[in-house]
Image (tube, rainbow, N blue to C red):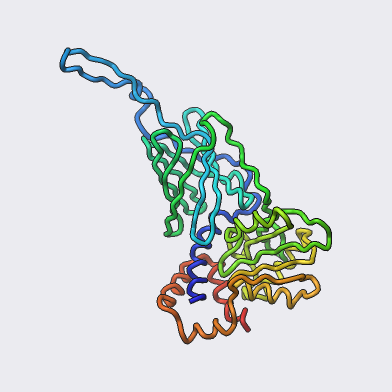
Amino acid sequence: MRKFNQIRRASIFACVGLMFGFGAGGFTNRNNVAASEAGTQPSQALTRTRIDHDYGLCVQQPEPSPRKIEGNWEGTLDVDVAKLRLVLHVIRKDGVLSATLDSPDQGATGLPIDSITLSSASVGFEMKSLGGLYEGQLAKDDSQIDGKWMQGGQTFPLILKRLGSPSEGTGAVESPLKLQRVDAGGHSLNLLFGGQRVGEATPAVILEGGFGAGIASWSIVQREIAKFAQVVSYDRAGLGQSDPGPKPRDAKQIATELHAALQKAGIKPPYVLVGHSLGGPFVRVFASMYPTEVAGLVLIDPSQEAFHAWTKTNPPPGFKEEVAKIANAPQGLRDEYAAVDATYE
């Protein structure tokens, strides 16, 4: 059952990782492709005519005030195994809407939105590079958008609430975490840093996600750890927007790349390694390869060799169907799954 849950989580994280696992270069403000607001033309929306049958009079009444989505909006994307705080920034220039998105928990700001539309009370925006689409309904007082985020065949509820008034600025939300692309031996990994060390002897906390998971899986945990320690999460090679790495993607290769990236980024030992699920074997192998650099291990519901062997002869219900889905998953996820047996050897 644990392996079944690993595969289910991986399909979710593959979606989230692709959504918010950008390289640092992708967070700078860029020119956005904006969509014109749908609806009637301005010349047609100025007035409407009502015939008063009792008096035979023709009375002109002004149209209701146009709906407004300009400003800052905040919401939480809840995908069961992770919660990500998102901030949408919408501006109107020369009658045209444009927008960007921040993911403060991951140090991501200014993610470009390709198009955003407002038609009556319906709001929609699209991020083509991610294959992601948002659809929602604007509340009558323009204070909230009730909607859903759709990506990779999955749908997640996402309610956006207005921050301040529409006239306030649309600056990025400050995050205590910073993202950086780091060389790991010929290819780059996305590392997310936060917190400070009290002294050189104080360990840095290194977070290793489960099967197919990375930065997104630690969004809440990392923010809290950063309050008292230096902490690093990352997307393994081939996941999120980290570059693909050499195969096989087994524990030894992953530990080698993580060690190289930490050295390149200036994150010096000692380390406390935190491994969740399949990340458990990964950090155990890291500790065996670099024993003098590891101060401790924290294993969260870790995968185990004996259980892995047992599931081969005793697959839980639905296991084969979940495994079949991996054939359509991103290449990095498929490569990681293909090396699971090698990891346990």
Figure quadrant of residue 43: top left
Residue 49 horizontal side relative to residue 280, left or right = left
Left or right: where does residue 322 sit relative to residue 277? left
Residue 324 image point, x, y percent: 44, 73
At a point 51% along the width and 75% down the height, the residue shown is 2
Q: Residue at x 68, y 49 (%)?
A: 176
Q: Give the farthest residue toward the right.
A: 200
Q: Is residue 52 above or below residue 308?
A: above
Kindly indicate the quadrant of the structure image that contains residue 318: bottom left
| Residue that appears at 49% across and 41% down | 161
**Rendered location of residue 232, percent (x, y):** 69, 59
Report the number of numbered marks. 0
Residue in the foreground of this view, choosing between 255 and 8: 8
Residue 141 rendering spot, x and y as whole percentages: 41, 33
Q: Which quadrant holds the C terminus?
A: bottom right
Q: Is residue 234 above or below residue 95?
A: below
Residue 51 in the image: above or below residue 136:
above
